[in-house]
Amino acid sequence: MVERVNQFSGIARERISTNFYRLDRSPLNQISIYSYSFIPEIESDNRILRTQLLNKCKSLIEKKIGMFIRSGNTLFSKTYLSDSFSIPVYCHENTEYILVIILAGFIDKKNIDVYRMYSNSALKKMLQCLDLKQITKMPKYFDIRQTQRIEQHRLEVWRGYTASFSHNLKEMLLNIDFSSKIVRDTTVLQAMEEIRNRCRGQNLDANLDNELIGQTIMAKYGNFKCYRIEGIILNENPTINFLTKDGSLSYIEYFRKTYNININFTKQPLIKSYIEKGTKEIRLIPELCVLTGISEDMKKDYRAMNDIAAYTRLEPIKRFDVSMMLAKKLANNETCREICDEYNIHIDPTPIVVDGFRFDMEMIKIGEKNSDFVCVDKKGVFFVDNSILKAVEIKNWVVLTTERDAMYRDKLIKTLVNKAGLIGLKLGPAMTYEYHPKNVDSLIRSLGKQQNGPVPQIILVVVAPGDKKVYNDTKAICSLTLGIPTQCIKANNITNAKKFDSIMSKLIIQIAVKTGSLAWSNLHPVPNLPIRTMVVGIDVFHDTVQKAKSVLGFVASIHPKFTNYYNTVRIHEKSGQEIANNIGECMLEALHAFHKATKNRFMPEVIIIFRDGISDSQIKATKDSEVKSIKKMFLTDFQGYSPNLVYVIVNKNTNAKLFSKGTGGYTNPNPGTLVNSTIVPDEQSFYLISHYVTQGMVSPTLYRIIDNDGNIDLMIIARLAFKLCFMYYNWSGGIKIPAPTMMAHKLAFLVGQSIHQIYHEQLRLLPWFY
């Protein structure tokens, strides 16, 4: 049922079901916290030895403090023992260690972090009792007995759950969501051989690194753990020895003795990876590890993606049932109940229902006349087919095709000219050239020389599918040297008769905005938000060539309707402080651009930053570094200037799910749905759904306001975020995150993938990276 909220126009209220569950803990029973250490000292990152020693004396510990849960360097128990105690224990090298255990305190609800850690340790034990395996560092648990085989694509789908406790607003809540993992048949060794054959052995080490580093693989033995490939060690193989608890063994001997596995290829290189939070380097055997995830070839195969989606993309009603079924098992399974009783935990298997809000759909201004606007439909989309907000004439533009695709060139140009006329854009005659993939760079360089004719406002390049070299060369030369926007289109898109017209409609919008036109804007401003407001999007992408570097993308509005933006990047070491310093510098540049755009009349009164790419554990550091860096810049570079700064962390990858209940069961909530109570992390947080999905389950985006100088109302910020989700000119509809944040991501991604350098200043005021 939807109820209208009178005091805030344009907002409705409705009840929303969630995938969160309450945890009750009796105040009568006390949980003791014990810390433990070893003499002589064992470093905390040496978890393997610490675990071995603890396991050896587990029964002796339980005689003292009863059944216990271990988490890191802490033990939890219902037994209270005020006196410290010690236990001698020997390791495999016959070294005597003394285990010392000391009472450190008690769990209480004020001690949020310890309480959460304790609850998650108990939860992990319950899930293990249900034969669910945790194969990654994430709190994801899979039932390997229920794997789904897709034989035609040589892969398996592992199905399971994401489950963890977190402190939400005023209480500890359990979040349960469906999870899946794709496990391929292809071993890493087979992938190496494919790469070797493809490159014919030339630059093998570089090609292996480029294609394999960063991929997640699964060890098909033991507990099926997953690891990230950090390197391929070509000068090592399974015959070399390494140190084990039983002494020095070769990898061949170790796997035969420990897992009864014979390694067939003794000359294969080894894989470098890390465990213990990245502190301990290990080696893996390519033959015994398989690739996970969906390959690039599969992503292009519609049938393959459909076959996989049948097992991974659950509709809302099914996803709701999967979550609730696990909650009921945890609450009612006999073994789980014993653990609940032992550790003083009780899970209520009733999904939490909260009060949600829903913003009215946006109205979009698409032309200069007052009547030129469209309404966003219930699916969060609108259509731009007869005008755009502001058209900038394109007199000089270039179309490049290969000789093979030249036959489609005239139709392409004619269609674009016709589409341009429909939206009020004057598009002059195109200059056309044919290129060979090997010399496209020299051809493009010549186009930027004035003696060869007018410098084009944009260059359109028809690229063969998968030709990364032509794409990267085009982007690099035009953005670094010439300062000319480019638009690349795959050749198969201009030969696809069924989709040709819709593709051309989108393409002309891209060409228009990259040369300075404005496609649309929100018809109505955000109520009670000062007109002199700047919105900023920030994201970071790791450079694919300069592995130790990251690219910071920064996009800031310079117009009160949030239609025009200044963009810049910084390439830096992966250091928090360097990122913070760079953000301060980028903000300084953006303020100068804003001041210039307003003809030096004023500066923004309010600056609202939407920052992507920050985890919960990084929030405090972000506030201490990035926010302080910006405020310091205000003081040092602009005397007397003190705008109200709002810093919002945007997290699009959450496990929270929201459900609307209709006559046919649970469905996805409509775009515009907002929740800011009970399940949010704190009072300055909200979940917002701003996009529509045609299949499966929609995921809300979490917004966390970590700094708010002007105490701007949360609803104002939420409504602004929703409006900005319709201001991304690459899609005529709502997207998952605000447009400036998406633009910052696209900018950082393009520079990190294709350019790897700071681009031409002429592009700073154009969305050339779309």
Image (spheres, rainbow, N blue to C red):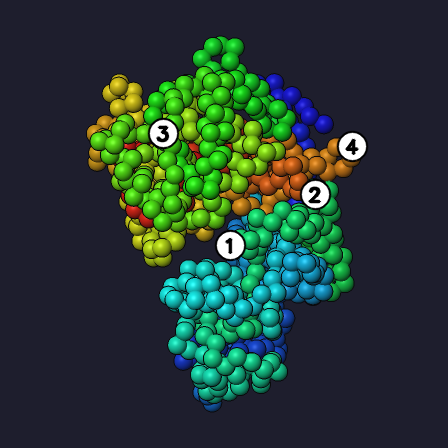
Q: Nearer the viewer, mark 2 or mark 3?
A: 3
| Figure check: 287 above or below 322 | below
| CB under 8 Å between discs 4 and 2 | no
User: Percent x, y for residue 750?
Assistant: 39, 44
| Figure check: 216 above or below 304 | below
Label 3 sits on a secondary structure element that is strand
Question: Few, some or many C-alpha atoms within 10 Å of disc 1 (few <14, some 14-19, many ≥20)?
Answer: few
| CB under 8 Å between discs 4 and 1 | no
User: Which three-letter amino acid code belongs to the residue tagged 1?
Assistant: Asp
Going from N to C along the chain, the mark reached first, 4 or 3, is: 3
User: Which three-letter amino acid code belongs to the residue tagged 2?
Assistant: Glu
Q: Which residue is mark 2?
A: 315
Label 4 sits on a secondary structure element that is loop
Going from N to C along the chain, the mark reached first, 4 or 1, is: 1
Residue drawn at 56 percent across, 28 percent down: 501
Q: Is residue 656 left or right of residue 433?
A: right
Q: Which residue is mark 3?
A: 431
Separation of disc 4 and disc 2 at Cα?
Answer: 16 Å
Separation of disc 4 and disc 3 at Cα?
Answer: 58 Å
Q: Nearer the viewer, mark 3 or mark 1?
A: 3
Residue 663 tag number = 4
Q: Which residue is mark 1?
A: 113
